[in-house]
Structures are given as C-alpha cells and as structure tokens.
Image: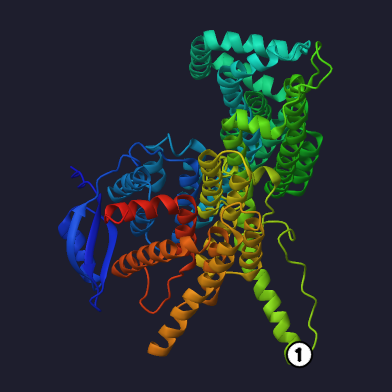
Amino acid sequence: MAVKAAKVSVYAWEGTDRKGSKVTGELSGQNPALIKAQLRKQGINPGKVRKKSASLLSFGKRIKPQDIALFTRQMATMVKAGVPLLQSFDIIGEGFENPAMRKLVDEVKQEVAAGNSFATALRKKPQYFDELYCNLVDAGEQSGALDTLLERVATYKEKSEALKAKIKKAMTYPTAVVLVAAVVTGILLVKVVPQFQSVFSGFGAELPGFTLMIISLSEFMQQWWWAILLALVAAFFGTRHALKTSQALRDRRDAWLLKLPLVGTLMYKSAVARFARTLSTTFAAGVPLVEALDSVAGATGNVVFKRAVLRVRQDVSTGMQLNFSMRSTGVFPNMAVQMTAIGEESGALDDMLDKVAGFYEAEVDNMVDNLTSLMEPFIMVVLGSSSVDWWWPCTCRSSSSAQRSDMPIDELFTVYPLAFVVTALLLGLVVGSFLNVVVWRLPKMLERDWRQQAHDVLGLPTVTPVPTYNLMLPHSACPHCGHRIRPWENIPLLSYLCLRGRCSACATPISKRYPLTELGCGLLSAFIAWHLGFGWPAGLLILLTWGLLAMSLIDCEHQLLPDVLVLPLLWLGLIVNSFGVFVALPDALWGAVAGYLALWSVFWLFKLLTGKDGIGHGDFKLLALLGAWGGWQILPLTILLSSLVGAILGVVMLRLRAQESSTPIPFGPFLAIAGWIALLWGGQITDFYWQSVGLK
C-alpha cells in the first residue's frame, strides 16, 4: 500500500553565507528541518525558516495557459539536458511565483514518484492538460523520444497562446475605448449637462436637434441611472450564464462571429491557423491521422470548424484523402486545401501544414494591426461629430440680440474652474508622456554631441555617418525587442493598463516610471490649476513644474542637470518677473545671483576642506533658476528643506544598503521639490515659523 507523500510547502528563510553576508530566499520542502539541511549543503548557515502564507493578493490566483506553456518549455529543456524527471519538477516548481502553479507541479511530481507515467499524471489534471497534450506526451514516453515530443508540444502551446494574444489585442483597444467613452458619457450626462442647461436656455437661439436629444437623455439618465446600471449588469451576467449553460447558444454565437465584417475574417483565419498548427504537431509526433483529427476538432475554437473537422475525420476513416474531404466541407480556404494536397503527395504533410499555420498566423498579425488602425479614425470621426453638435450652441447668436453670445475661453475657465482643472489634468498626462521621451533621449543626445565635439577637437578621421537621433526620430520602440510603439500603445496611462504593463510584442515588463511620470505630471498640473485658479501664474507655474519634473528624473538616473533645460527656464523666470507675475524684477535678479553663489560657495568650501567635489555645477544653476522665479526670499527655505530631506533620505538609503557610501546622491530632485513647495507656500511656512518662535 502506497504511503501518502507529505505535503510540500514554500518556506521563506534567512541566513548567512560563507562570507558572513546576510542572504534570504525561498525554498519548497516538507518541513523546516529539511529546508535547513538543503541550505547547509549549499554552504549557508540557516537562521529563521518560516512557512510562507498566501497573501491576499496571491489568494485564488489562477493558473493561466501561459504558465502551462512555460512549464512545457522548461520541461522540454530539462529532459533534453538529461535531467531526471523528479529533479526537473523540483527545479521548475521553485521557479514559479504563482502558488497554484507550484502546487500543480508538485502534485504531478508526487504522481510520478508514486510510479505513474508522466502522461498518466497529466491526465489526472484535465483542466490544465487537454487530451492532445497528454496523448503527445504518452507517445513520447512510449517511443523513447520524450524530449523531442515535449519540444513540439512546447512550440505548439507557445504559438497557440501567441495567436490567442493577437486576437485579444485586436479586441482590447476598441473595447477599452468604448468602455471609457461610456463611463465618461454617463458622468457628463448626469453631472455636467445639467449645469449647461441654464447656459443654453439663455442663448435665445434654436438648439440643434442632437443637442436637444442630449438634454432629454440627460434628464432620463438623472432619473433612471440606477435602473440602467442594474439592467446592464443583469444583461452581462445573464448572457455570460446563458453561454456557459447552453451549447446551442454558443454554437449560434460562433457561427455569427464568422459572419461579422473584419472581425469575422480575423476569427476565420485564426481558426484555420489553429487547425493547421494542431494537425501538424500531432501528425509529426506519429499520431495516426484519424486520432489526430479527434484532437484537432476541439482545438479550432469555433463550432463551425469543429463540425467540419469531425466530418473530415469520418471521411478519412473510410479511405478518402484529407484534401478531398477538406474541400467538400466548404469551410477551409483553397490555399490550405492545395498545400494539404501537396503535402499528401510528397509525404511531407506535417511540413506543409506547418507552413499553412505560419502563413495564417502572419495574416492574423497583419489584420490585428490594420483593424486597430481602422478603429482610430472611426472613433475620432464619431467623437468629433458628436462634439460639434454638442458645443455648437455655445457659439450660437442670440435671436434677440445682434451681439454674439460666445463665452471666451478665459471666461469659461473662470466661471467653471473644474473645466480648467480637468484641462490641466489631461494636458499634464499628455505632457508626461512626452517627458518620458525627454528623460530617455536627452541624455543620449547630449552624450552623442559631446562625443562628436571630442571627435572634432582631436581631429579623428570621419567615421560612418551617425543616424538621426532627437526627440522626434527615430520612432519610439521597445528597448528589448525593437517593436515600434504604435499610437494606440502610447495613450497616457490607458495604454499601460490595457497592455497590463508589458510590451505587446515580447511581453517584457514596462518600467513603472512611465505611467508614474504621466500620472504625476497630470496630478501636479491639476493641483496647481485648482490651487491658483485660471490665470498667468497658474499656467507659468505648470510649465515650470514640467521642467522641474524632467530635470529631477534625469538627475536621478544620470546625475545630470542639462543646461538645455535649466538655462531657458532661468531666463524665462527673469522675463516673467519683469512683469511682476511672482515677485519684483530686482528680487528675481538677486534671487538668481544669490542662488548660484550660495551653492558655489558651499562647493568651494567643501573642496578646500576635503579635496572632493561635493555638489555638481548643475545644482548651482538650478537654485539660481528657483531664485529667478521666486525671488531671493524663497532661497533660505529652499536650501533648508532640500538639505533636510536629502540628509534624511541619504541616511535611510545607507542604512538599508540601497546606496553605496561612495556613490553620490543626486541633490537636484531635492532642490526641485523644495523650490516648488517654497513657490506655492513659502510665505505661509515662513509666517508659521516666526509665529511659532514668538517673533511675529
């Protein structure tokens, strides 16, 4: 009688290596004692070992088809390298972050350890490993070519998931746009339109029919929005439940999808690609054609193709050639039938089907790009025409007056401050996307210029011309795979969320700095608009904020404050204050001079005492910039706040070993943050301080 194996859990451990350095990690095992034994074998002196509990975020995390594809590829690599199955399970299982996937790999391992074959162990998990998968693994074990069959299965799973991802990508953009448009439209109808009704009523002009319809719809939404919301939710879950429980409804849905324009062609070509890919893989693995068609029928993903494949299977079992049977169904394209006939005649059916699959997968890829491109102008036309009909009354003449009743943009933003805040938010998001380009490209552009200058000074011979590289060209692309970023993949925040933070081509994670920069730029712009209200001070301070944000990010990554950003903003501050926008011009001039000399003096004093450069020259110019905008009055508070925050953060980073003691910490971001705060609240902070010490 077999003894049930002990449950394997994930343990988090802490210990010290041979050099005495503290190390941490995770290991899978049956109990803490075995974990400590494993660590000692690796030369680690174990300390704490505790069972890792599932967090709320990881609780209920499902196993995705991509996880199964990755598991298959890793198993193929391990078996081909000669690693025993049980050891392969251990190595692969520990590499998965998903606890559910770790558990699945461990359960398969326990089945194999109990004496079952690999295929038998997989068949006990039919929700993850379908009949095709298990049959191919079984064929590999029986023939002694498990590594070859696993390679084919891995390739099949990867290409199948890539095809599914392309279909999802084609649907994601229009779906996301429609959903966002629906939500925004609902908010406008319920909250914004009622505010404009009083404005429209004072025009005295006849409103367009579309606008009257919008007003009526707004009144209906205000009264029945809850019923509409409940109806939409009920319709969604009702349709979902009906599709799960009714095979006839699913069949009608599949047939209907193939008849849709554009989308139907996309679904048709993807089904042909899945048919050819699956049949090529199974036939190449040595599975008899009749049996292979059984597996292919369920893999096409569409009931129309499933019925056609089952009919083909019946014809082939009676002796008919595959290509004749495919032609008789009237479902398969002529190109696929012709390639199948050539494969049957030449004895290379698996190769021909593989070429068919590759052709239609490329067709799907091209259609996805074209379909998404077609959606953009269509959506813009619809939204544009709606906007014209909606905003036209705002420029109508009054029927009782010869004067225009237009509301200038400055008056609109003054009367409706929320409109100014929203505009600043949206503009900030767009500018934040551009700042990401500046932060990435400007240091590289400067480095190229410096190299060219050095090349000219040294009189070196001319080399191959360097391609154009500026803020506009070449087009933005993924730094890992070179995939060109298309317009719909560059919508601030929305694209990052739709892509789930990964490149659409290679699935490499996108740095969180990009969406955070866009969000930060948008929120800071909106805050200034709300805090100061519509006017020149708000617009100019928003512009300064964009510049400070770009300089801070560049300084954090490259310890560089580019003159091409600092100096224009410094001169702009002096020009602005020549009109007395923030401070008087003499205060701005002395602020620029004092800001530069203050840190310049600290630089030379530190260098005389230690022989080292303590502050970069860019910091002198940045403080001069802040003095030019806010006057000499904000400099003491700016220096105090930046020094205090910099010292605290530096100590924390050193204690956490996030920063080597010999590595300088950029001071520019602290100056920028402190100066921004001083510009907005410098007077209030200073008054509060003097009052707290009893001097005012």
Q: Quadrant of residue 212?
A: top right
Position in image of residue 137 (x %, y %):
47, 47
Seen at 17% across and 64% down, the residue is: 47
Seen at 31% across and 39% down, the residue is: 56
Left or right of 29 in this view: 490: right
Secondary element under disc 1, as helix, strand or loop, is loop
Tell me if residue 239 comes above or below residue 453 in the rendering: above
Q: Quadrant of residue 436?
A: bottom right
Position in image of residue 130 (x %, y %):
48, 37
- Give the residue pinned by disc 1: 460
Q: Residue furthest front?
A: 696
Tell me if residue 534 comes above or below residue 676 in the rendering: above
Mark 1, Cα crowd under 10 Å, few <14 / some 14-19 / many 20+, is few
Q: Is residue 693 visible from the viewing direction of this image?
A: yes
In the foreground, 687 or 618: 687
Q: Type of residue at label 1?
A: Leu
Tell me if residue 510 comes above or below residue 671 in the rendering: above
Quadrant where the N terminus sits is: top left
Position in image of residue 509 (x %, y %):
52, 53
Q: Is residue 96 visible from the viewing direction of this image?
A: no
Left or right of 691 in this view: 15: left
